[in-house]
Amino acid sequence: MVSVTKYDLTGCSAFCRSCQRATMASQPLRLAEEYGPSPGESELAVNPFDGLPFSSRYYELLEQRHALPIWAARFAFLEQLESNPTGVVLVSGEPGSGKSTQIPQWCAEFVLARGFQKGQVTVTQPYPLAARSLALRVADEMDLTLGHEVGYSIPQEDCTGPNTLLRFCWDRLLLQEVASTRGTGVWGVLVLDEAQERSVASDSLQGLLQDARLENLQGDLRVVVVTDPALEPKLRAFWGNPPIVHIPREAGERPSPIYRDTIPPDRVEAACQAVLELCRKEAPGDVLVYLPSEEEISLCCESLSREVESLPLQRLPPRVLPLHPDCGQAVQAVYEDMDARKVVVTHWLADFSFSLPSIQHVIDSGLELRSVYNPRIRGEFQVLRPISKCQAEARRLRARGFPPGSCLCLYPKSFLELEAPPLPQPRVCEENLSSLVLLLKRRQIAEPGECHFLDQPAPEALMQALEDLDYLAALDDDGDLSDLGVILSEFPLAPELAKALLASCEFDCVDEMLTLAAMLTAMQHDFYPILTGVWLTYCTPASGLPCQCNSFQLTSDLPAAPGFTRPPLSAEEAALRRALEHTDGDHSSLIQVYEAFIQSGADEAWCQARGLNWAALCQAHKLRGELLELMQRIELPLSLPAFGSEQNRRDLQKALVSGYFLKVARDTDGTGNYLLLTHKHVAQLSSYCCYRSRRAPARPPPWVLYHNFTISKDNCLSIVSEIEPRMLVELAPPYFLSNLPPSESRDLLNQLREGMADSSAGSESSSVQEFRDPCVLQ
């Protein structure tokens, strides 16, 4: 990066970026701030990435960058990036040291010096919110326009362009790109940030990069893995002892944590009281509060917003801000300069991925609420568990500085010493791996268990994923991807939902299924969850400390109909909600909610009056458009909307059964006790199911198809619709029905199957073929 007084740009405009980049790239790799003029010395000090003069804000931010601990490691990092023969560099540093903002910029300078001949820079983040926030910050620091030279890619939002040279990307999207036959683009440097978060995509990307069969990533690719020091030994062994760039510790003093003698019975109340005490003392600095779940975050924010207004303060009342995936673009308020103190209430999302320099006080509950998938029963556990020692240290370091702040731990010191694991649990050992195995098969990895992982997933989890894909006809007789499986892997959906969407092409209900697929994805997406979950407390033995049995208790159930964020607040709101519910079940209710949202003009006030998540519905609208575009590109047949007709009702049920036959339950005694077909667990309809809110005290539906099975106090089935068992026999593979565990339900299905075979013996051969693959695409 040099100060340029003249360009030879014959035939080009004064600011032709491609020509300017080529000119700048021929210069040695140096930073403008190292020898460029200061503001006011020259008006021709230009940014080598776009050829425009640097602004005054660039120099203001540059001073802040120089103060970061990572700045002392800049030359060591660039030297390793340039000279290391393996192409892999580890960067190890504490949270808040500047890793996530400075490493990408230095990598961009590296590829600029190489003239972009070897590709550009892609930076992965474990959370979409972090990818967007970092892109905004880095674009500001580099004095560039977001969406041009610096951009980001997150679900339903691609803020990049043809000139983008530095892209921040959600790691799951990048994993999908890697697995796609359309290619991965040209990379000069791939930065895997926040590796200590142990997301499935991050671990899988590292495994794929280790796999020699990933040929299109070989060559001169540089891989930078950024992590916390706690994970450094494992990563060093995994990558074969590559060079490590250690970031010096920040000079600020570390606060001594203050522990409680016992765990408070009400975490939200204890956290609120601690915040109010800090406000009364008017101690300087912002406050960061860690609670386990989004429900507790919302309650804490509501309570604090009421309480702080009545405090007798000399300054403005504190501004209470939530920070979790449901915040969307509102998360940027956390970084804005304010005259008032900020109180940021968050959970595990801010353990590593968000740096908040103004924080001086931390209040830590020491717990996190996570969903853990059990492959044996194809269900999720809501587990409230202690955070890891690594997370606890990261939270404490948020309050370091001159002088050090405070860190109040709402638990005894023995709590972490006895219960907390050293590192966060790897998500690859806790999530449904069907989508991952589908992508690995797309990369022609015959045995997913042979893929490199930092921690190998349980064999039963991989076997269950393979079994599910086989039932969905995504695998052929050799265990490779079938033609249908290749198409399924193109969709950014769970395999069973993608199969239902493809089946809708056969049953002429594509329009409705597109809407449903978008709504179901938006509801359960990490980016914009809609439904309210359950409240859990950790199992507490006589010692008063949470045990390691992973058990829990349901303490408060907040019912909400599908698509709604909370229970109705008034009779008027309840009536507005009932008008959106559909008698055919929760799936049709979701379609009806979406249609009403579109008819309202996507009005935010209309959503607020009904307790709907406006941001999530907007994301569902975007996702629906992307799915429609994808189907058109693959040249799949579409159909006209017919929602509400009797024929469409049956067609929609058939499409759902084609994908979700693994998730069917039968009422065993007429009282709402549902026995799941794939195992002998008994479950209840969730309290927000439309059958419970509209049909009581009528008999519950005898056979239902569900979207999720969550282990809680009542073993809830969520997003439920009634089906006919005849459809299950017609559309589910016969080898699936044969493998069901012995039960009265299986006997009833076999009897129905035999009766149907006797009545249509002449068409038996064609029926068997339909059973095996009901969604044959011509």
Image (cartoon, grey):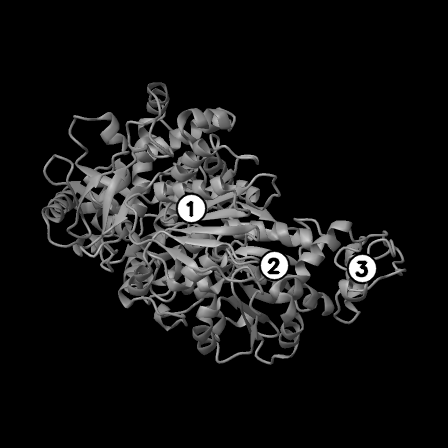
Q: Which one is closest to the eye, mark 1 or mark 2?
A: 2
- Separation of marks 3 and 1 at Cα, in angstroms: 42 Å
Instruction: Check contact, mark 3 vs mark 2: CB within 8 A.
Output: no
Q: Which secondary structure lies at badge 2?
A: helix
Disc 1 versus disc 2: distance between alpha carbons? 26 Å
Q: Is residue 681 left or right of residue 500?
A: left
Give coordinates of residue 323: x percent, y percent: 48, 45
> Would you name the residue on which mark 2 appears?
101
Amino acid type at image mark 1: His
Identify the residue position indicated by label 1 in the image. 525
Q: Residues within 10 Å of mark 3 (few under 14, many from 20)?
A: some
Residue placed furthest toward the top: 572
Q: Nearer the viewer, residue 62 or 595?
A: 62
**What residue does disc 3 label?**
19
Percent x, y of residue 53: 81, 53
Q: How far from the left and from the top, in percent, is residue 443?
A: 45, 66
Asked if 495 appears above or below 31 in the picture, the reply is above
- The quadrant holding residue 644 is top left
Is residue 377 found left or right of 389 in the rendered image? left
Please state which of the two labelled residues, at mark 3 or mark 1, is closer to the viewer: 1
Q: How many marks?
A: 3
- Asked if residue 758 is positioned above or below residue 512 in the image, the reply reads below
Q: Is residue 431 visible?
A: yes
* Precedes in sequence: disc 1 or disc 2: 2
Q: Mark 3 is on which residue type?
A: Cys
